[in-house]
Amino acid sequence: MRIGELAARAGTTTRTLRYYESRGLLPARRSGNGYRTYDESDLRLLRQIRTLQDCGFGLEETRPFVECLRAGHPEGDSCPASLQVYRRKLDELDTLIAELGAVRETVGRQLARAEAARAALAAEAAVPGGPEPECELGGGPR
């Protein structure tokens, strides 16, 4: 098949395929008239790359999976190098989840502090002679 058909079947663009080719992830075979030619195994490589990228893997992180498929394995993740990439990605995700958890706790504390301060202002406003609550956007008394 030619590059346009492969791109359509893989749900990508010919530009992307040429980029993958330049990065050594997609083989560059040419027909007698100079057109790039591809087969079903190339479509399989592309699907592996796209699936991994959809899960957050960088293009270079897909290389061991592509090489595993090219080596004739039925799945791109049946080689030790692919499994190592999975492990690294899981470690990276665990780190990000922990960081997001810490940020969430900080935002939660800030919200609780802001709500308590607002409630205190409202309580003071209910007391005769207490301050009138001000809008944070500078709109005056509420």
Image (tube, rainbow, N blue to C red):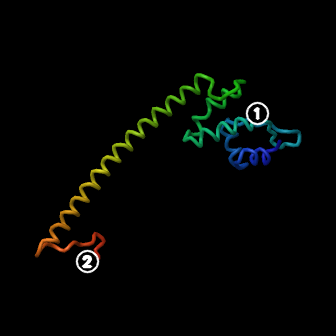
Residue 110 percent across, percent down from the top left:
27, 54
Q: Which mark is residue 73?
A: none
Classed neighbour count for the residue bearing mark 1: other residues with Cα under 10 Å, few (<14), some (14–19), many (≥20): few
Q: Is residue 82 left or right of residue 124?
A: right
Q: Is residue 50 left or right of residue 57?
A: right
Q: Which residue is mark 1?
A: 41
View extreme (bottom): residue: 140
Mark 2 or mark 1: which comes first in sequence? 1
Q: Nearer the viewer, mark 2 or mark 1?
A: 2
Q: Is residue 109 left or right of residue 63?
A: left
Residue 63 percent across, percent down from the top left:
62, 32
Classed neighbour count for the residue bearing mark 2: other residues with Cα under 10 Å, few (<14), some (14–19), many (≥20): few
Residue drawn where x is 80% and y is 46% of the image:
5
Residue drawn where x is 19% and y is 74% of the image:
132
- Of residues 11 and 81, the one nearer the viewer is 11
Image quadrant assignment for residue 43: top right
> What's under tag 2, amino acid-wise?
Gly
- Of residues 90 and 36, the one nearer the viewer is 90
> What's under tag 1, amino acid-wise?
Ser
Q: Which residue is mark 2?
A: 140
| Quadrant for the N terminus in the image | top right
| Quadrant for the C terminus in the image | bottom left
Label 2 to label 1, Cα distance in Å? 68 Å
Image quadrant assignment for residue 118: bottom left
View extreme (left): residue: 129
Residue 70 percent across, percent down from the top left:
71, 28
